[in-house]
Amino acid sequence: LSERLGGVFDRLTKQGALSEDDVKTALREVRVALLEADVSLPVARQFIKAVEKKATGAAVTKSITPGQQVVKIVHDELIATLAGEGEPGQLRVDSPPAPILMVGLQGGGKTTTTAKLAKRLKERDGKKVLMASLDVNRPAAMEQLEILGKQIGVDTLPIVKGEDPVAIAKRAKTQAGLGGYDVYMLDTAGRLSIDEELMAQVEAVRDVANPRETILVVDGLTGQDAVNTAQNFDDRIGITGVVLTRMDGDGRGGAALSMRAVTGKPIKFVGLGEKMDALETFEPDRVAGRILGMGDIVALVEKAQQTLEAEQAERMMKRFQKGQFNMNDLRMQLDQMMKMGGMEGMMSMMPGMGKMAKQMEGAGIDDRILKQQIALINSMTKKERANPQLLQASRKKRIAAGAGMEVSDLNKLLKMQRQMADMMKKMGKMGKGGMLKQAMR
Ligand code: GDP
Ligand code: MG
């Protein structure tokens, strides 16, 4: 695959902005990579289409080919899609006893994952956990959970032969309440494929338990089927999260993308083996790298971007020392702040900038209006950005209107720019190796 990609990238050497052709050519290879990683076909298609829109017209970093640039955009988009909102690695287990319902197909790793999660809840969160097997279909399934429970020191609901899953769920609930448990976990039976009986059974259990979390356990090696499974369980039962098992295998884990695309629910953990501690928090960047399998290209582009940013910072510093600070500089600062996670991120990363950050706060800068200010600067002409003193009433009106804001907003921005120019001049006077240089590092 690398060889094939190399060929494509050699052909794509144009610099500047990504053309539709650049993007299409590179995305053909990306599509193959996704399918090889077992991402389901419709999901791969949909993903490629979204990236195509985003990538076309995007800037190409100096010394990088368009094809490489597209791969980096794909990689970032993949991470964003896999991550979604919310914290991975978290289970909602407030208001004890909190029920957790484990669902999925047979052999997916439900029972193993139930015990792994119980162990984690016990050891990391200090929770008292009760596990109950509702698997009345497979012989020895209940004993399997009991054995795991003994192994990890977590209680299991005593086995009563002949009970149906709903009755077991009710007993688990009662027992969890009486026994002072923080969490009780219901390990349901699976089938080899989705069927009505299975769904009806899980539904009935869900209605009895009213779970805080309903975790779908999916074999990370399953490809096209994963989508169907997820869709069915989510539609019928309503899942709150996913655990992908067997991510210790050779598979590239494309099921992760399929899961996210189809359910929109967070992937919380990955299973990395049969042992009880082989469970890790889901890490979108790691899985993205694995799905795409183009880590070397991504690293190359990141390096080029870093080099470019360092050069830019160096140039900027020289200008500041001369007391030059126009709207272009301000925009770069604002962009940088957005990238670093807003005000808070910036303050933590730039020790010398505390004073400036305070001043900006005083001028009414917070993360919400960073974007608005960038929009204001964007609606200025090149000349205006370089020479903000040009801005008289009519120009101000035009710029504010162009950004959908008021002239008073623009005036605030101008005031900030003047303050910063002043400050830069002062800092510049402190000489080389002074505050500014340290801060820029
Ligand atoms: P269930 O039918 O969904 O309850 O699946 P089980 O929990 O019984 O797991 C089926 C098999 O998969 C068992 O042999 C487990 O040890 C194995 N298994 C579960 N999770 C993982 C995992 O993350 N990695 C590997 N390699 N094996 C796993
Ligand atoms: Mg089982």
Image: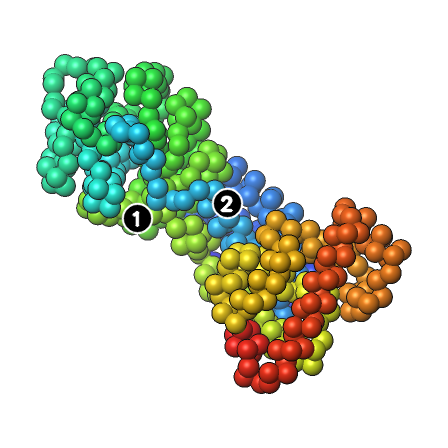
Q: Which residue is mark 2?
A: 81
User: Could you classify mark 1 by the number of other residues whose Cα lies within 10 Å: few (under 14), some (14-19), or many (20 or more)?
Assistant: some
Vertical comparison of 225 with 395: above or below: above
Q: Is ligand 1 less than 8 Å from the beta carbon at label 2?
A: no
Circle 2 SS class: helix
Taking the spot 79% from the left edge, 59% from the top edge, the residue there is: 380
Where residue 20 sits in the image (x, y, percent)? 69, 53
Q: Is residue 376 left or right of residue 162?
A: right
Residue sitting nearer the eye, 29 or 323? 323
Question: Which tag, 2 or 1, sits closer to the chain's start?
Answer: 2
Vertical comparison of 24 with 170: above or below: below
Where residue 134 sits in the image (x, y, percent)? 22, 23
Vertical comparison of 170 with 324: above or below: above
Taking the spot 14% from the left edge, 41% from the top edge, the residue there is: 152
Q: Quadrant of residue 171?
A: top left
Residue sitting nearer the eye, 425 or 88? 425
Answer whether residue 196 is visible to the viewer in this image. Answer: yes
User: Farthest residue toward the right?
Assistant: 394
Q: Which residue is mark 1?
A: 280
Q: Quadrant of residue 410?
A: bottom right
Where residue 392 sits in the image (x, y, percent)? 87, 60
User: Could you classify mark 2 by the number of other residues whose Cα lies within 10 Å: few (under 14), some (14-19), or many (20 or more)?
Assistant: some
Residue sitting nearer the eye, 320 or 408? 408
How are the colours assigned in the image? Answer: rainbow
**Disc 2 and disc 1: Cα gap in Å?**
19 Å
Residue sitting nearer the eye, 211 or 244? 211
Where residue 359 sits in the image (x, y, percent)? 61, 63
Q: At label 2, which amino acid type do we have?
A: Thr
Taking the spot 79% from the left edge, 66% from the top edge, the residue there is: 388
User: Farthest residue toward the bottom?
Assistant: 432
Circle 1 SS class: strand
